[in-house]
Image (spheres, helix red, strand yellow):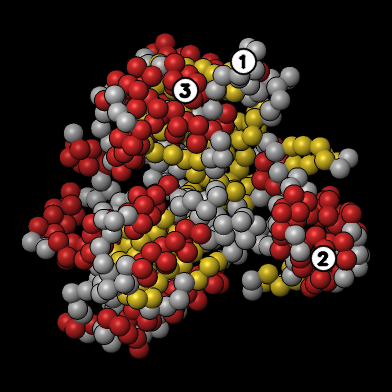
Amino acid sequence: MSSQKTELTSPLANEQLSQLNQITASMSANQLAWVSGYLYGLSQAGSPAGAVAPVAGSTATAPAQTLTILFGSQTGNAKGVAQQATAAAQAAGLQVRCISMADYKPKELKSETHLLITSCTQGEGDPPDDAIEFHEFLASKKAPKLSDVKYSVLSLGDSSYEFFCQTGKDFDERLAKLGATAIEPRVDCDVEYEADASAWIERAVAAMAKEMQTGAAQVSVSAASVPTASASAYNKKNPFTATLETNQKITGRDSSKDIRHFEISLEGSGLTYQPGDSLGIWFRNDEKMVDEIISKLGLDANASIKVDENEVSLKEALIRHYELTLSHPGFVAKFAELTANETLTKLTEDRDALRQYIDGRQLIDIIREHAAKLTAEQFVTCLRRLTPRLYSIASSQAEVDEEVHLTVGVVRYDAFGEEHFGGASGFLAERLEEGGEVDVFVEHSHFRLPEDNSPVIMVGPGTGVAPFRAFIQEIDAAERENDTWLFFGNPNFTEDFLYQVEWQSYLKDGVLNKIDLAFSRDQAEKVYVQDKMLEQAETLWQWLENGAYFYVCGDASRMAKDVHEALVTIAEKQGGKTREEAEAYVNELRKNKRYQRDVY
């Protein structure tokens, strides 16, 4: 079945496919690895074959050594840095392969000689989902001695969190303990990571080129000069200006939640996505809030501000380029310093008190409490650059063609006597009218349906149901034969049963085989999706034993942890295992990509 699927989905013409098979048939494993990495780098660079070729003459003198670039990425940033490093290394004439830690076999580590790692951190210092196995392997007794390995680590994080860049720090520490040598010191990047990442790529690739003795050290490996996309390709740095077609509230009038269904046209973009991917939204800040900030700080709205290489007005910069809704300790510290505010300065000396203070406060709240006079240049030094928000895609292109659907919970709350909105959700729900324009890009994911007809178990309470709507649309449109089971939860049946009519239709047609519902506030005792899993423990275990894939999407802080705990408990009790054996069973599911999570 897999070969048939390749034939159907291959973008190559029959002649091209035949030529490719002839070329690769005689290649060694090492040669295949090099070609794979080389072509992957070209595809990510958006360049035609040969555009990022090794330097002249380097092929003959190139050693058998390969630079391996591993990434652990939750939102795509670490993956993007790894791809940029791959293109830079190829431009320097290095043999290179770029691979997700989820696809990397840890036992290969003992054969590596040159290694670059890029990784983000999520939650309380945890590795991203695709890095969990590799992270655990490096800390285990199975990890080999790595005295012949030269490496460098780039860590992505957010200094607002206590365990800033912890996963990258872990990788660096563990590699060093195993005897590997850091050829370039680890770099820990904050939210605005691009400049630091580009500088690290330039230094690390140059060091690797010199170490691998290809003569490529004389080649410019500046990350800034490496093409990342062709002029016609749309991505994070070059988003597509799409049209919002539908903004529909799908929770009831009396619901405690405001959840919207958005339909966005991608017509003319050429953008493609698969179920499990995310859509990046470049939003614009509320103009009224920007005007108030400018007024409170006595700023000149027309003052010229340099953003990247462009000069724009301060007002334009605050609307489109700087983060104004998410408070962080760095803003308070810098603002306190520039305004000589003793109250805020004292607050910055107590980390716990500072975190408690900014919880629930947006920048406008802090400015209202501590208005002062600043210049435009001073104020923007307090700010972080605006970052896009990623939303799990709730549609399959096999069903909706040149559209993309989202299921978004609107962040809306009252605080300090004012109504507050989230940056992106407020923009989409309240300020962007149907027919209006929004800049978007697709972020590809490892959250994927099985390639075969294995059963599918989906746990998606609240807006976590979004990718599973895409899964079911795909299964329906492609006439796949996967058995499917959905666990969905929300507060109330009458107010919060998202896409109720669609699920009922899929059940009737047999596209969805089972659905278990957990409406937490419809009875005296709260019931959640993990409770429904435990109620169905025997059947769920049978599905897993029959090869089912288990998917979770939604809240990472509580729900995903509770669902994981329930899954281990089911393996323990239904499988007759010890706790350790049950945990090992669940870990094996994850290693085999039968346990996948899209959590945030």
Amino acid on which disc 1 is placed: Glu
Numbered label attached to residue 525 = 1
Instruction: Tell me the quadrant of the picture where the C terminus can be found.
Output: top right
- Tag 2 secondary structure: helix
- Tag 1 secondary structure: loop
Q: Nearer the viewer, residue 250 or 136?
A: 136
- Which of pointers 2 and 3 indicates the residue nearer the eye? 2
Q: Nearer the viewer, residue 126 or 408?
A: 126
The number of numbered badges drawn on the structure is: 3
**Label 2: how many Cα within 10 Å (few below 14, some 14–19, many 20+):** some
Against 567, residue 185 (above or below) is below
- Tag 3 secondary structure: strand
Residue that extends furthest to the left in the rendered view of this protein: 26
| Image location (x, y in percent) of residue 307 | 68, 69
Left or right: residue 41 compared with residue 159: left
| Image location (x, y in percent) of residue 296 | 91, 59
Left or right: residue 397 compared with residue 101: right
Left or right: residue 11 compared with residue 535: left
Instruction: Tell me the quadrant of the picture where the N terminus can be found.
Output: top left
Tell me where residue 84 sits by quadrant: bottom left
Q: Is residue 399 at least partly visible in the picture?
A: no
Which residue is labeled 3 in the image?
A: 487
**Label 3: how many Cα within 10 Å (few below 14, some 14–19, many 20+):** many
Which residue is labeled 2 in the image?
A: 345
**Label 1: how many Cα within 10 Å (few below 14, some 14–19, many 20+):** few
